[in-house]
Image (cartoon, helix red, strand yellow):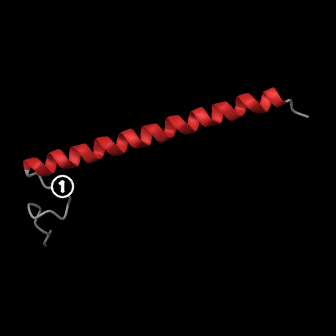
Amino acid sequence: MTDKSDNDWKTKAALAAGAAVGSAAIAAALLFVNKRRKDKAEGHSPTTSKAPHFPPETD
């Protein structure tokens, strides 16, 4: 079958990969929140197609 050392390094690799993904997600969330706070403080509104400066299309 498999040896204990074979499973051991796979477990460590999986934990390291999980930690890397988790920390990247946290960093992205913090950057997003920081940008939203900065935009809110400067008075910028989020740009969407529903914003008032885009009138509805008419024929």
The location of residue 6, given as percent across then percent down, is 79, 28
Q: Who is closer to the viewer here, 7 or 55? A: 7
Residue at x 40% of width, y 42% of height: 26
Q: Who is closer to the viewer here, 45 or 13? A: 13
Residue 17, image quadrant: top right
Residue 9, placed above or below residue 27: above
Residue 57, image quadrant: bottom left
Relative to 58, 6 lies left or right: right
Viewport quadrant of the C terminus: bottom left
Q: Residue furthest toward the bottom?
A: 59
Relative to 59, 1 lies left or right: right
Amino acid at pointer 1: Pro
Q: Who is closer to the viewer here, 53 or 9? A: 9
Residue 2, placed above or below residue 48: above
Mark 1 neighbour class, 10 Å CA radius: few under 14, some 14 to 19, many 20 or more? few
Mark 1 sits on what residue?
46
